[in-house]
Image (cartoon, helix red, strand yellow):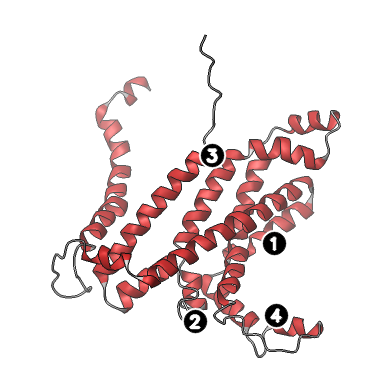
Amino acid sequence: MKKLYSNKLVITSLVLPGILLFVFAILAPICLSVYYSFTDYSGMGALNFIGIENYKTLMKDETFFIALRNSLFLAIGFICIQHPLAIIVAAVLDKLSGKGEGFFRCVYFIPNVISVAVIAYLWKFIYNPDFGLLNNILKVFGVTEKINWFSTDRAIWSVLIVLIWHGFGWGMLIYYSGIKNIDPVLYEAAAIDGATQIQTFIRITLPLMKPVIQVNVTMAVISALKQMETVYLLTNGGPGNATQFTATYLYQQAFKAFKYGYGNAISVIFIIICLIATVVLNKIFEERRPKKEVR
């Protein structure tokens, strides 16, 4: 075995496919995107190199900053609403046993296996002001007004609810797996010491779940920044730009307005923001070791 792994030809044959996949599927498209961002390419015909003009225009584009603000708002919604609920539900499921645990685990994950198109049209019917389920439920409580859930002041909240509901299963399942990997002996020791379930959750579960929380939160922020399909099918960024997100605005500029170069400039800024968000979150979750006293 040692002789096999010391053979450079074997090592190259094992590593090369992964390197080629990374270069052609990830690195090359990013480099092309950076190149096109410095041109006025429309997606067809010739292109002209225009330097940083796309980036200058982008810095003055109010719609882009609205889209970025909405994406950050969604990220905050994921972190402050979706993930606290997901980790609590995961902890409760861990305490269940038998068929109930498996049943609820599947129920919470069902939205993630349903097509995005089906999800979008399902919620369109739920939010419909004339015959929608939500307005009919409100009628039971005496609210007779036909509420337009996609009006300018309500649309972003309506979209936020759909996205939190749709992605809840993934977050919950990852937290559930993390909790299952915690040594049960720690919980038994805590029970012997007389710790309550809340104390056990705060003092044992949360600290040991820190690496899982870091990965899940980072994925949630990146998911919020690149959110596109559900929003596009629900509102297409409307009304006005009330539900415009970075990814939907990129799509509209590149493939509807035929500003392919400008769309690539948005994508480059998007990549930079994702990298910054990842670095910042890694710093926040970084283990801080106590400084050694100098004698």
Crowding near the residue tagged with mark 3, few <14, some 14–19, many ≥20 C-alpha atoms within 10 Å = few
Whole-angstrom CA distance, mark 3 to mark 1, is 31 Å
Q: Which mark is residue 107?
A: 1
Which secondary structure, mark 2?
Answer: loop
**Badge 3 vs badge 1, beta-carbon distance below 8 Å:** no
Q: What residue type is disc 2 on?
A: Pro
Q: Considering only order in the chain, which callout, 4 or 3, is on the residue closer to the N terminus?
A: 4
Q: Considering only order in the chain, which callout, 4 or 2, is on the residue closer to the N terminus?
A: 4
Q: Position of residue 148 (x, y in %)?
A: 62, 85
Whole-angstrom CA distance, mark 3 to mark 4, is 39 Å
Disc 2 designates what residue?
239
**Badge 1 vs badge 2, beta-carbon distance below 8 Å:** no
Disc 4 designates what residue?
134
Q: What residue type is disc 1 on?
A: Val
Where on the picture, by quarter, is residue 210? top right
Whole-angstrom CA distance, mark 2 to mark 3, is 38 Å
Q: Note whether 143 is above or below 22 in the view shown.
A: below
Q: Considering only order in the chain, which callout, 1 or 4, is on the residue closer to the N terminus?
A: 1
Disc 3 designates what residue?
285
Foreground pick, 5 / 219: 219
Which secondary structure, mark 3?
Answer: loop
Image point 48% across, 39% down: which residue? 283
Whole-angstrom CA distance, mark 1 to mark 2, is 33 Å
